Amino acid sequence: MSALDFSRISAAALADAEAICRRLIPGGRVRSGEYVACNPNRADRRPGSFKVNLRTGRWADFATGETGGDLIALTAWRFGVRQSDAARQLAAHLGIDTEARR
């Protein structure tokens, strides 16, 4: 199995950050460069504490203290998978080949 290029996948995801956020966490809104939504992993009734910065990919739920540094981490958190699996999922969604090049 080849090593994943996390930086490449993260950068590609960031270029499509709003669409990825809408796919991962439907129902949010963009406010001041952030995707603001209800936390889908808890019984969150009103948006406001869960935010994803669309320029950097950093995300946080300020009510629970959960945070992450990029959209790979967001995908991993959202679906309860390892970072490598989340990176592969995002790469597949973005059309990025993750196979080793010779």
Image (tube, helix red, strand yellow):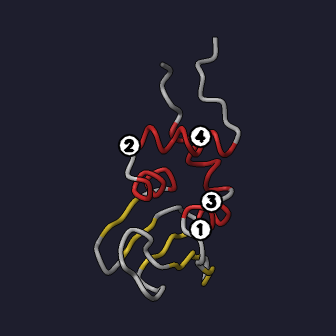
Image marks 1 and 2: residues in contact by CB distance under 8 Å: no
| Mark 4 or mark 2: whose residue is earlier in sequence | 4
Residue under pointer 3:
20
**Residue 28 x, y percent position in the rendering:** 58, 78
Q: Nearer the viewer, residue 23 or 5?
A: 23
Residue under pointer 1:
54
**Residue 82 x, y percent position in the rendering:** 38, 43
**Secondary structure found at label 2:** loop
Looking at the image, residue 65 lies above or below residue 47 = above
Looking at the image, residue 24 lies above or below residue 94 = below
**Residue 74 x, y percent position in the rendering:** 46, 58
Q: Which picture quadrant has residue 96?
A: top right
Left or right? Give the position of 18 relative to 62.
right
Inter-mark Cα distance, 4 to 1:
17 Å
Amino acid at circle 3: Ile
| Mark 1 or mark 2: whose residue is earlier in sequence | 1
